[in-house]
Image (tube, rainbow, N blue to C red):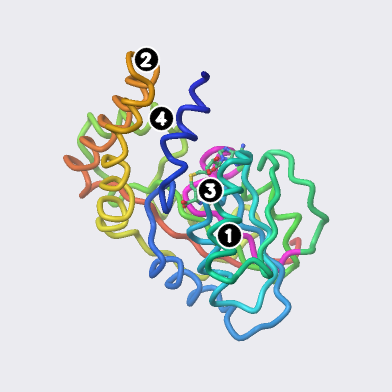
């Protein structure tokens, strides 16, 4: 079994695959100005099992294309959508965010929670921009330093994991130099990491290890998560996810 398969299995039963919360998706929605419009076309990129997709479908008059490269996550999303009576508003698409089969200038909004880091913040903003109508909105959450200074251990850890980690000021500057006008930013609270993501994840470790008894690879997957959680608990004052909401400007 390769690592991605193990990761997918560990995360499949999660309500979400990263920090976040329905109330936080709604907070970003309020900043987006999308509510009250009808016939919206939205892509949720790196949707996982659909935590944000379901909120968007419930709150907006929209057709939502939920995109992820893991078909097992999309199956779970479809089941959840059907159970919530929201299946009619959601279509799923198994595709890579690096090569999206979308038409130019067709989307009113791109949503992406805890996923754009897979392609890189700036590359994602640059490449996905073409799919948005002028005036369309992008809303993404992204690893963010909460202050200019931080302890060396956490600085080294996140720089090694994700070279683009930066402050909100840095991220907003990236938006501005790539043809977007920021509409808002907020930092995700601790509850979005601990209560909504890490605690439910920790609760799945034992069953996951039991299902892969004696697998060093499965143990390594759990160990990596344990280390990440320990670092979050120790250094949570210094980093979080930032939610960035911005509008596509016409070409200068
Ligand atoms: N938005 C969800 C999932 C976040 S985890 C939530 O907030 O709960 C990141 C997601 O990105 C995972 O579902 C993973 O399968 C997906 N992903 C990672 N690399 C990808 C790629 N290259 N193309 C498409 N999806 C990708």
Considering the numbered disc 3 on the image, is that residue within a helix, a strand or a loop? loop
**Does the beta carbon at disc 1 come under 8 Å from ligand 1?**
no
Q: Ligand 1: does it lie within 8 Å of the C-beta at label 2?
A: no
Q: CA distance from mark 1 to mark 4?
A: 23 Å
| Precedes in sequence: disc 2 or disc 4 | 4
Estimate the spatial distance between the alpha carbons at disc 3 and disc 2, rounded to whole Å. Answer: 25 Å
Tell which tag, 2 or 1, sits nearer the viewer: 2
Mark pair 2, 1: CA separation: 36 Å
Residue at position x 69%, y 82% from top?
Answer: 38
Ligand 1: quadrant of the figure: top right
With 8 as the anchor, is 34 left or right in this view?
right
Q: Nearer the viewer, mark 1 or mark 3?
A: 3
Pointer 3 residue Cβ closer than 8 Å to ligand 1 = yes
**Numbered circle sitting on residue 48:** 3
In whole angstroms, how far apart are the C-alphas of marks 3 and 4? 20 Å
Q: Which residues are magenta?
A: 107-122
Q: Is residue 16 left or right of residue 136?
A: left
Residue assigned mark 1: 111
Q: Earlier in the sequence, mark 3 or mark 2?
A: 3
- Viewer-nearest of labels 3 and 4? 3
Q: Give the number of the disc on residue 215.
A: 2
| Residue neighbourhood size for the residue with mark 1, other residues' Cα within 10 Å, grouped as few (<14), some (14–19), many (≥20) | many
Q: Nearer the viewer, residue 126 or 217?
A: 217
Mark 3 vs 4, N-terminal side? 3
Magenta stretch: includes residue 155: no
Q: Which residue is labeled 4 in the image?
A: 161
């Amino acid at each position: 079994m390769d690592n991605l398969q193990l990761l997918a299995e560990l995360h499949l039963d999660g309500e979400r695959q990263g920090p976040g919360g329905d109330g936080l998706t709604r907070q970003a929605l309020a900043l987006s100005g999308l509510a009250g419009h009808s016939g919206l076309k939205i892509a949720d990129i790196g949707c996982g099992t659909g935590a944000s997709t379901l909120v968007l479908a419930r709150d907006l008059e929209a057709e939502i294309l939920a995109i992820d490269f893991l078909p097992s996550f999309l199956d779970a999303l479809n089941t959840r959508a059907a159970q919530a009576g929201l299946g009619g508003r959601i279509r799923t698409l198994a595709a890579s965010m690096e090569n999206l089969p979308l038409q130019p200038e067709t989307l009113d909004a791109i949503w992406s929670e805890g996923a754009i880091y897979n392609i890189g913040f700036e590359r994602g903003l640059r490449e996905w921009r073409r799919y948005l109508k002028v005036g369309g909105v992008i809303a993404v959450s992204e690893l963010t330093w909460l202050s200019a200074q931080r302890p060396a251990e956490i600085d080294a850890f996140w720089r090694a994991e994700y070279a683009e980690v930066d402050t909100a000021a840095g991220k907003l500057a990236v938006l501005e130099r790539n043809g977007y006008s920021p509409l808002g930013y907020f930092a995700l609270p601790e509850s979005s990491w601990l209560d909504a993501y890490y605690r439910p994840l920790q609760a799945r470790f034992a069953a996951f290890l039991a299902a892969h008894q004696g697998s060093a690879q499965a143990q390594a997957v759990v160990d990596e998560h344990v280390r990440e959680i320990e670092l979050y608990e120790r250094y949570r004052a210094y980093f979080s996810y930032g939610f960035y909401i911005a509008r596509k400007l016409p070409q200068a």
